[in-house]
Image: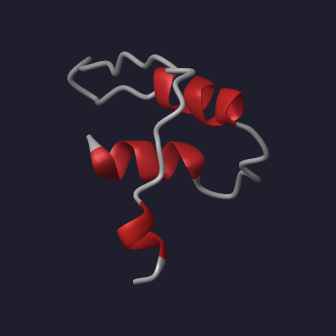
Amino acid sequence: MFPHITRACKGVILKSVEIVNDLIAKTKTSTGLKVTTNILNLKFPRNSSSDHA
């Protein structure tokens, strides 16, 4: 599915998560496989040890 998603997003300015979500949701293969997407509005804590890497 990744090549199909890449083609769906080609040439599009990805200004927001919603635009990316819509493009991915519209993606399907020639055999009819479709992608389901969800936006998770979660905040994850930053790991202070990885901030210095």
Residue 15 lies, with reference to residue 47, above or below; the image says above
Residue at point 53%, 42% (across, down)? 8
Q: Is residue 12 left or right of residue 32?
A: right
Q: Quadrant of the N terminus?
A: top left
Q: Position of residue 26 (x, y in %)?
A: 51, 22
47 is higher (above) or lower (below) than 26: below
The image shows residue 51 at horizontal and vertical percentages of: 48, 72
Q: Is residue 22 above or below residue 52?
A: above
Extreme-front residue of the structure: 48
What residue occupies the far bottom of the structure in this picture? 53
Q: Is residue 45 left or right of residue 18?
A: left
The location of residue 48, given as percent across then percent down, is 44, 64
Q: In which quarter of the view is residue 21 placed?
A: top right
Q: Position of residue 32 (x, y in %)?
A: 26, 17
Q: Viewer-proximal residue, 44 or 38?
A: 44
Q: Residue at x 47, y 37 (%)?
A: 44
Q: Residue at x 29, y 30 (%)?
A: 29
Say which quadrant the C terminus sits in.
Answer: bottom left
Q: How many marks?
A: 0
Using the rendered view, name the quadrant where residue 16 is placed: top right
**Along the line of sight, the residue nearer the viewer: 38 or 50:** 50
Residue situated in front as seen by the camera: 50 or 12: 50
